[in-house]
Image: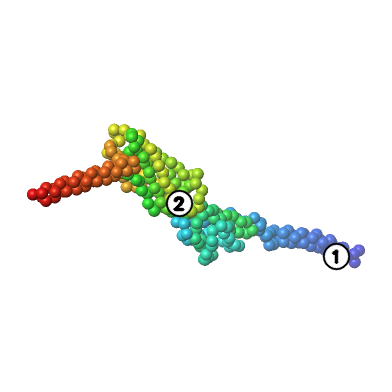
């Protein structure tokens, strides 16, 4: 019996050792699951913005300009520009690219800047407008025929004609206005507008002016003529021709009478 006691103690120790080892292995597995390397980050990119500056620019036909495209993306994968306008030099920095556009002649163009960040592409758009302020706005002297004035205004070298509005003012009052939006020419043009105004006694002595108005998506360009005065008497082309004929006849008559008188005087002297 005494020899069985040591054997019994060995079996008891072996039985107690198995569960302990199992608990350690399970604890080690749980520790590795929670304290190991964290899962890989999601591939979804963080929000970022794209800006183009200026967003609107008006230039004279043939001018050049610079557009700057920037982004809040920390590591942009690429910048690109979409435009039908001729391109020149390009300058760049960590989060921006500047593009030069040459010889702008299209009256209105959309320019798009694209930026790719973490596989996602976003864009910003700018609008470029080419225009030319009128070289001159000339109002001819009013012509009175009967009881109507003929008012004629010339607007020279203006672009784009389709955005032009020509207005006649008597004092501070608009008496006539015409929009030329039906014209789609892409070249500089000269415009002549003619308007007939019924004459009233209160019009005599009033100043009349002609105004050219370009409204280019918020950019307003104004040009005006020198004022002309409405008078009670004005030379019409027919009146001018009649007056010239009358003066010529008057001069001829006086020359003939003078010649006859001189001849009479010479005859009288010769007889004496």
Residue that label 1 marks: 10
Instruction: From the viewer's perspective, tell me whether residue 260 is left or right of residue 224.
Output: left
Residue 236 in the image, given as x and y percentages of width and height: 33, 41
Front residue of this view, candidates 69 and 257: 257
Front residue of this view, candidates 210 and 16: 210
Disc with the residue nearer the chain's start (2 vs 1): 1
Whether residue 232 is visible to the viewer of this picture, yes or no, is yes
The crowd level at tag 2 (other Cα within 10 Å; few <14, some 14-19, many 20+) is: some
Q: Residue at x 47, y 50 (%)?
A: 160
Front residue of this view, candidates 253 and 244: 253
Image vertical order of residue 259 relative to residue 24, above or below:
above
Whether residue 170 is visible to the viewer of this picture, yes or no, is no
Find the distance from the CA under tag 2 to the CA under tag 1. 114 Å
Residue that label 2 marks: 189
Instruction: Please tell me the numbered disc located at residue 226.
Output: none
| Residue that extends furthest to the front in the rendered view of this protein | 271
Q: Residue at x 37, y 51 (%)?
A: 136
User: How was the colour assigned to the protein in this rendering?
Assistant: rainbow
């Amino acid at each position: 019996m005494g020899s069985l006691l040591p054997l019994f103690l060995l079996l008891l120790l072996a039985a107690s050792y198995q569960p302990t080892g199992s608990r350690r292995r399970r604890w080690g597995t749980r520790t590795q699951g929670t304290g190991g390397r964290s899962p890989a980050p999601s591939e979804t990119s963080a929000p970022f913005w794209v800006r183009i500056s200026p967003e609107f620019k008006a230039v004279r036909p043939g001018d050049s300009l610079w557009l700057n495209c920037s982004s809040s993306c920390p590591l942009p994968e690429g910048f690109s520009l979409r435009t039908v306008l001729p391109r020149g030099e390009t300058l760049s920095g960590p989060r921006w690219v500047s593009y030069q556009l040459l010889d702008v002649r299209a009256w209105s163009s959309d320019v798009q800047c694209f930026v790719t960040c973490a596989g996602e592409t976003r864009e910003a758009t700018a609008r470029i407008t080419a225009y030319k302020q009128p070289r001159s706005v000339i109002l001819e002297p009013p012509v009175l025929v009967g009881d109507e004035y003929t008012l004629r205004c010339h607007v020279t070298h203006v672009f784009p004609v389709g955005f032009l509005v020509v207005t006649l003012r008597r004092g501070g009052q608009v008496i006539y206005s015409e929009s030329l939006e039906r014209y789609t020419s892409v070249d500089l043009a000269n415009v002549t507008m003619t308007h007939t105004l019924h004459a009233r006694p209160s019009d005599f002595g009033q100043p009349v002016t002609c105004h050219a108005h370009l409204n280019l998506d918020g950019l307003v360009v104004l040009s005006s003529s020198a004022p002309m005065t409405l008078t009670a008497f004005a030379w019409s082309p027919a009146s001018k021709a009649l007056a010239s004929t009358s003066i010529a006849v008057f001069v001829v008559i006086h020359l003939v009478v003078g010649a006859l008188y001189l001849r009479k005087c010479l005859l009288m002297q010769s007889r004496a």
